[in-house]
C-alpha cells in the first residue's frame, strides 16, 4: 500500500497496519490482501465482482475487516459482498470505503452488502465512508445494505459519513424473523454542495422482533439531506425511528417517516427534530472562553460523537 | 473590581419601549456580594449585561479599571468573568466531562474532573460520562453549572439563583462551596439569590427592583430593613 492508501485505510478503520483477524482489502477495484481464519472464510465470487464471507456457527470474538480504497481518479467500482453469519456466532465486521480523488473524473464505489444472520447470531457491523482529494472530480458512494435476521438474531449497524463524499444514496432493507432485533445508528455530516439520501426500511415480520433506527446529522453550507425511514410492523413487535438534525448556513434537511402497523400489537414510534444550533448553547460555551466558531465545532462534534 | 456606570437597557415590547434597567451604578469589590430583589426586577438582565450577553443602551462596564463595554462574551470570559446561568443549557452529545474540561480550559485527568463534581455533591463516577441532555434533572444541571465555575476559577464569578432546584442537604454544601471559593479564589463572587442564608454570608448586599438599585450596603446595613419589609420596597419581602 502507498501513503495515500494507508491514509485512507486509517481514516475508515482507525488502523495504521493491516487488521487483526480476517480481512480482505480491495484497492482500485482489485484485491490487495486477504487473510482467512479457521472460522472465517472469504471466497471470491465467480459470477460477479465481490466476495462471499462465511462465518462458522458458534464463532466468538472474531472480526472481519473489508475496507475498499479508491485512489485513482475516475474509477467506477461496483461490488457485491455476501456475509453468512452462522448460528450462535458473535462477531464484528468493519467495512468502509475511502476515496482519494486528485483528478477531474468521477470516482464511484457502489457496494451491495447482504447480511444473512442465522438463528441466535449476533453481529456488530461498523461502516465508514470518507472522501478526500484536491481535484474537481466527484466522490460518489451508493451503498446498499440488505439485512436478513433469522430467529433471535441481533444486529447493530453503525454507519458514519463525516467528510468528502459528494453524493450518496444509502439504501438499507431489512427483514426480521421471530425475536430478532436490529439497531441502526447513523452519523452523517454534509458540507459544500453535497447531497446525501438515506433510505431505511424495516419489515418486522416475526413475533416480538424489534427495530431501533436513529440518525444524527449535521448539514452545512448548501448541502442537502433526505432521511427516509419506513417501518412495517407485520406482527407483535416494537419499532422506533428517530431523526435528529442540525442545519447550518443554507443547508436543507428533510425527514420523511413512514410507519405502517399491519398488526394490532405492533407499537411504532417516529421522532424527528431539525433545527439550527440553539443560540443559548453557543453563548454558554462562549462564557467558558470559546470563540463562536470553537463553540460551534464543539457542539457539532459532540452531537455526532 | 467590577464597576457599572450609568447602565441603562430598554427593549421594544408590543410596539412600546420598555425600560428594564435604569441608571445602574455599582462598584463590586473583591469578596462576596449578594444581589436580591423581587422577580422581574432586572437581576438576570444585569448579570447578562456583565457577561456581555446583553449590550446595554448606555453606560460602561469596567473590570479592574479597564473598559470592557465593547468586549464580546468570549473576550470577557477570557478576561476572567464566569457566569452560571439561572437556566442551564442542555447539549445533546456533550458530556459532563466535556463541559468541565472546556470550562477548565485544559485537559483534565479523570480524578481532577471528578474532584470538581464532588465539590458540588455529585457522585463523580456516575456523572462524568453522562450527556448534558434531558435525562439530567434541573437540580443536577444547576450543580454541574456551578462545578464549571469552580473549574474556571476566574476573578469574577457570577451565579444566577444557584439554589433553585437544589435540595436541603445540598443547600448546606452549596453554602460551603461558596465559602471555600471565597477563601481560595479571592476575586469577586456575585450571587443573585432570594435565600436568606445566602444573604447571610454576603459581605455586601444589593437590592434591585424595577430595574433600579434600591439599596446597597453591608449585610448589617441592608438585611434588617429588608427582612422587616418597611421602607425600601414592601413587595420585596413577599418574595424572600
Ligand atoms: N428581551 C426582553 N423583552 C421584553 N421584556 C424583557 C426582556 N428581557 C427581560 N425582560 C423583562 O425585564 C424584566 C426583568 O427580567 P429579569 O432580569 O429576568 O428579572 P429577574 O431576574 O430579576 O427576575 C422582566 O419583567 C422581564 O419580563
Ligand atoms: Mg432572574
Image (cartoon, coloured by chain):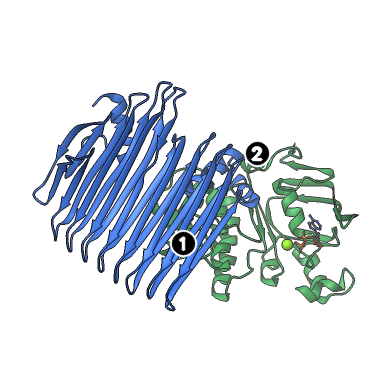
Rendered shade, chain B: green
Quadrant where the N terminus of chain A lies?
Answer: top left
- Numbered circles on residues, count: 2
Query: Residue B53: x percent and y percent?
Result: 71, 47
Query: To which residue does mark 1 refer?
Result: A241
Question: Which chain letter matches label 2?
Answer: B
Residue drawn at (60%, 49%) of the image: A277
Left-right relation of B102 to B40: left
The spot of residue A257 in percent (x, y) is: 51, 59
Q: Is residue A79 left or right of residue A285?
A: left
Alpha-carbon span between mark 1 and mark 2 = 42 Å
Mark 1 falls on what kind of element? strand
Q: Which quadrant of the frame does ligand 1 lie within?
A: bottom right
Residue at image position (41%, 23%) is A105
Q: Quadrant of residue B200?
A: bottom right
> Disc 1 or disc 2, which is closer to the eye?
1
Q: Colour of chain A?
A: blue
Is any part of residue A4 visible from this angle? yes
Q: Kindly tell me whether residue B109 is visible in this rendering.
A: no
Q: Position of residue A153 (x, y in %)?
A: 26, 64
The disc at residue B75 is: 2
Nearer-the-camera pick, A184 or B197 = A184
Numbered disc 2: secondary structure:
helix
Amino acid at each position: 500500500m502507498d501513503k495515500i492508501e494507508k491514509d485512507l485505510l486509517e481514516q475508515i478503520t482507525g488502523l495504521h497496519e493491516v487488521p487483526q483477524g480476517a480481512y480482505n482489502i480491495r484497492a482500485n477495484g482489485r484485491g490487495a490482501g486477504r487473510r482467512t481464519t479457521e472460522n472465517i472464510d472469504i471466497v471470491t465470487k465467480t459470477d460477479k465482482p465481490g466476495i462471499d464471507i462465511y462465518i462458522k456457527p458458534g464463532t466468538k470474538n472474531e472480526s472481519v475487516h473489508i475496507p475498499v480504497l479508491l485512489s485513482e481518479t475516475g474509477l467506477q467500482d461496483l461490488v457485491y459482498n455476501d456475509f453468512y453469519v452462522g448460528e450462535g456466532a458473535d462477531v464484528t465486521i468493519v467495512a468502509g470505503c475511502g476515496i482519494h480523488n486528485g483528478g477531474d473524473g468521477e470516482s464511484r464505489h457502489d457496494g451491495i452488502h447482504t447480511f444473512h444472520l442465522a438463528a441466535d447470531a449476533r453481529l456488530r457491523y461498523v461502516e465508514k465512508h470518507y472522501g478526500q482529494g484536491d481535484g474537481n472530480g466527484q466522490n460518489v458512494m451508493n451503498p446498499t445494505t440488505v439485512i436478513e435476521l433469522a430467529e433471535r438474531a441481533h444486529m447493530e449497524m453503525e454507519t458514519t459519513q463525516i467528510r468528502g463524499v459528494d453524493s450518496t444514496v444509502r439504501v438499507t432493507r431489512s427483514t426480521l424473523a421471530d425475536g430478532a432485533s436490529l439497531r441502526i445508528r447513523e452519523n452523517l455530516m454534509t458540507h459544500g454542495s453535497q447531497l446525501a439520501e438515506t433510505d431505511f426500511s424495516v419489515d418486522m415480520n416475526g413475533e416480538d422482533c424489534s427495530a431501533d433506527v436513529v440518525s444524527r446529522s449535521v448539514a452545512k453550507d448548501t448541502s442537502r439531506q433526505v432521511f427516509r425511514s419506513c417501518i412495517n410492523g407485520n406482527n407483535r413487535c416494537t419499532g422506533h425511528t428517530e431523526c435528529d438534525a442540525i442545519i447550518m448556513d443554507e443547508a436543507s434537511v428533510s425527514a420523511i417517516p413512514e410507519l405502517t402497523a399491519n398488526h394490532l400489537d405492533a407499537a411504532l414510534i417516529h421522532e424527528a427534530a431539525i433545527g439550527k444550533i440553539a443560540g443559548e448553547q453557543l453563548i454558554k460555551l462562549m462564557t467558558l472562553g470559546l470563540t463562536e466558531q470553537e463553540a460551534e465545532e464543539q457542539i457539532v462534534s459532540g452531537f455526532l460523537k | 473590581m467590577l464597576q457599572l456606570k450609568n447602565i441603562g437597557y430598554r427593549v421594544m415590547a408590543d410596539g412600546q419601549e420598555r425600560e428594564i434597567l435604569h441608571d445602574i451604578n455599582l462598584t463590586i469589590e473583591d469578596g462576596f456580594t449578594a444581589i436580591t430583589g423581587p422577580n422581574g426586577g432586572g437581576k438576570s438582565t444585569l448579570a447578562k449585561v456583565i457577561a456581555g450577553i446583553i449590550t446595554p443602551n448606555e453606560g460602561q462596564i469596567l473590570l479592574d479599571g479597564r473598559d470592557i463595554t465593547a468586549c464580546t462574551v468570549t473576550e470577557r470570559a477570557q478576561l476572567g468573568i464566569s457566569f452560571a446561568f439561572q437556566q442551564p443549557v442542555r447539549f445533546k452529545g456533550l458530556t459532563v466531562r466535556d463541559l468541565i474540561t472546556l470550562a477548565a480550559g485544559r485537559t483534565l485527568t479523570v480524578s481532577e474532573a471528578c474532584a470538581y463534581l464532588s465539590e458540588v455533591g455529585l457522585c463523580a463516577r456516575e456523572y462524568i460520562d453522562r450527556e448534558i441532555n434531558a435525562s439530567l434533572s434541573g437540580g443536577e444541571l444547576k450543580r454541574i453549572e456551578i462545578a464549571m465555575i469552580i473549574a474556571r476559577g476566574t476573578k469574577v464569578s457570577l451565579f444566577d439563583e444557584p439554589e433553585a432546584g437544589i435540595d436541603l442537604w445540598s443547600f448546606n454544601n452549596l453554602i460551603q462551596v461558596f465559602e471555600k471559593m471565597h477563601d481560595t479564589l479571592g476575586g469577586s463572587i456575585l450571587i443573585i439569590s432570594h435565600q436568606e442564608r445566602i444573604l447571610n454570608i454576603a459581605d455586601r448586599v444589593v437590592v434591585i427592583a424595577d430595574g433600579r438599585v434600591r439599596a446597597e450596603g453591608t449585610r448589617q446595613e441592608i438585611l434588617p430593613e429588608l427582612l422587616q419589609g418597611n421602607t425600601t420596597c414592601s413587595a420585596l419581602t413577599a418574595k424572600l
